[in-house]
Image: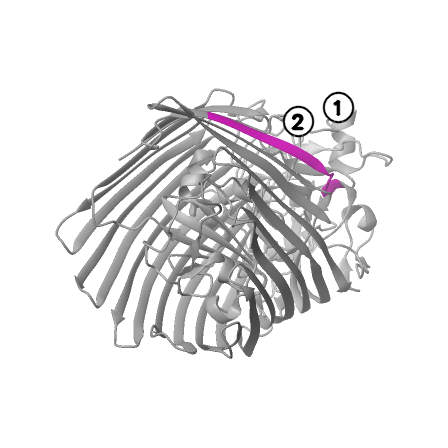
Amino acid sequence: MGDFRGGGLRLALCGFALMMPFETFAQGVDEIIVTAQRREQALQDVPVSVSVATGASLAKQGIISLADLSTRQPNLRIVQGSSADQLHIRGTGSGYNGGFEQSVATFVDGVYRSRARSTRLALFDIERVEVLKGPQTTFFGANAIAGALNITTKHPADHFELNALALYSPSDGEYNTELGVTVPLSDSLSLRAAGRFSGMDGYVNFDRDVDGPHLNDRQGRISLAWNPSDRIEIFARFDAARMRDRGAFPMEIYGCPPKGLPATGICAAAIAQFGPIDDKIDYHSDGAFSGRFNLNMREGLINSRIAFESFDLILSTAYIDQNLRAIVDTAPFPGLSVTGTGTRVPVNTGEDYQQFSQEIRLQSTADGPLQYMIGAYYEHGDLFTDTYTGLYLANLAAAAPAFFPNRTPIAIDWNFHQKSQTMSGFASLTYNLTDALSISGGLRYSRVRKKASRSALMGTGGRLYVTPEDFVAAPEAAQLLLARAAAVDRSQFAAPRRVDSEWMPSVNLRYEFSPDVMAYASFSKGFKAGGYGFVSPDTFEPETVKAYEAGLKAYWFGRRLLTNIAVFRSDYDNLQESQNITTVAGIPSLVIGNAAKSRAEGVEFSGQWKVSSALNLFTEVAYLDSKYVSFPNASCNPIQAAGLTSCVQDLSGRPRPFASKWSGSAGGDVTLPLGNSLQFEAGAVAYFTSSFYSQSVLGAPVRQPAYGKLDLRAGLGAPDGNWKFSIIAKNVLNQKTASFRNYASGTSGTGSVIADRPRSIALQLSYSM
């Protein structure tokens, strides 16, 4: 669904175009080419708020995941959680419901990856990643209602290329080795093969298991570029990935006992046996099980371009096959459970997903005052999830004594199956009213059909966690007794079929005061279809947004200084929301629904100053006010709900999760020649965020306080960049933070967190030719 030309980037940057280090040049800041509007344009000419990072810049800083990248980028937050990964732009994203499509859509070579976990594989052998902020529904589809990540992989060149990289961090055993080779097979055909082996020993200690996260990941890619004539370009690739991670969710208990509150439930019982458990992040987990994360993904695509006299015909065909299994202990307290198991609420989630997509697009190429694009898109998705939850907090077997011995571990198997079909048509027109003033209009119509079913089976589980092999469904009479005791709703969806459709218009005005100064103003309407909860019979309605943005992009002083500023406001209706709660029976669950209204508004500023050919400075700062305007029927947090069979609260006026009021970064790069054969490089990036919540059910256990971090690097290599040896230090100040926070099951006022990485120092060697 995007432009797939590999030669569109005209220079290699050292970081975010608007945030991170740029390479220094004698003639000022050079031009960057992006495909934010589905055709190649200079970044400073695009009337959209966009940040760009290149694969070369990410490798230089030792960044191999979108989650790591997002910590340095204001108004972007990507968190690898226990039940799903979270993507938020400007304080808006999708919750932890497996039935949600992501509000921040991810595209790799134009292929839409709808499953959140696949973002863990996105930054592999890439040319660049573009972070598009605000609704992008005209060019990228209905689900890009909060923004989009537009990623372009490295394409085969018409000459031999080789790049290799090896990184190792003694502090936590992180390693990353990459190799990519491009070989021309003929004058018109080139092949590229790339592979990555990466992993980590971990930095959180477990008493009874490996340190975590203990990562063991593999990725590979074969791609072909064929140009049989001057008018035909064909690009094809096949990706395969395998992740086998232990200790993948190193959950720590935080606040047992809670500050200013009495200990309850498991926390109180653990204190009675072991004394105070934990009230700080210390990279130690008392849980008996450190978690597993196994992911397999295969992806294939063929993108074709046929050039006619005044327009291009572009065809994109793709298929994705992904399956995963993630296991986590949501209550990692020490000691044995009531049922004699080492865990209390282990959750084992499996997911199988297949997706086929086809797009056809016509877009103008001839010079003139009018430029156009028109296209159609089809997508079919087939999703199946099975989630096994061990209900070991209580002696549920006592509810069915005729069927089970006392203290038998009882578990539940949630099954969810959804088939979806998306059809859409889109068009855009840009007309140059004068040499300085242009107006653009866009329109997309999308129709989404979904069919879903669910089941909830009660039975017995394993001694540590539940697997498909050891789960045994109980007789139906016993299931009725167990479901009543555990307050489990086993009903089907009230309406298992649904169709949602919407028109999404957009308009944009762009004015050039000079070749170096451009202002723009835009309006767009976005839409995301409704759907189903995957562990509950809840359904949710479509959400819509009306977004407004104005900005000024400018070069100054002979293009040595770059400044960009954007002012935005997005009004969401029926925002799809997922709220993590714990039932009266102590079971972690999700309440799926719609918040009536929310709003995200703020200001983003970025600047880069190339002081000299040796020194480059940069900064980016954002102010954000993202909140619920109307959410009167939100779920209560465990503290509010303690002892109650039902509880709701009014979150109107309260902040959205992952919505920092202030966030930003600043830093600089130094490049110094050391004779004719060596070059020294050094860089520093300081980044900060004000406090934010990591769950929509707000409360102290899920609030991350404000923090600031510092990354440093230094390198020595050849002036032409063929080889380089670097030392990369991250989180130099060793700040203890946790982007993912949740309420611990079986108690109130206590949280469970996955700590962010502490200080690390890595050695890296790179080579290219």
Percent position of residue 108, x then y: 40, 55
Q: CA distance from mark 1 to mark 2?
A: 8 Å
Residue 275: which quarter of the image?
top right
Secondary structure under the numbered disc 2 in the rendered image: loop
What's the amino acid at mark 2? Gly
Relative height, residue 374 to residue 647 (above, below) = below
Q: Residue at x 55, y 38 (%)?
A: 611
Q: Is residue 706 magenta?
A: yes
Residue 725: which quarter of the image?
top left
| Residue toward you, 634 or 329 | 634
Percent position of residue 643, x then y: 83, 48
Percent position of residue 345, x then y: 62, 41
| Residue toward you, 742 or 685 | 685
Q: Which residues are magenta?
A: 701-714
Asked if the residue under mark 2 is in contact with the one under mark 1, i.e. CB atoms within 8 Å, the reply is yes
Report the predominant secondary structure element of the magenta stretch.
Answer: strand
Name the residue that disc number 2 marks: 335
Name the residue that disc number 1 marks: 273
| Residue 618 visible, this angle | yes
Task: Give the position of the C terminus as an image quadrant.
Answer: top left
- Other-residue count near label 2 (Cα within 10 Å), few / some / many at <14 / 14–19 / ≥20: some
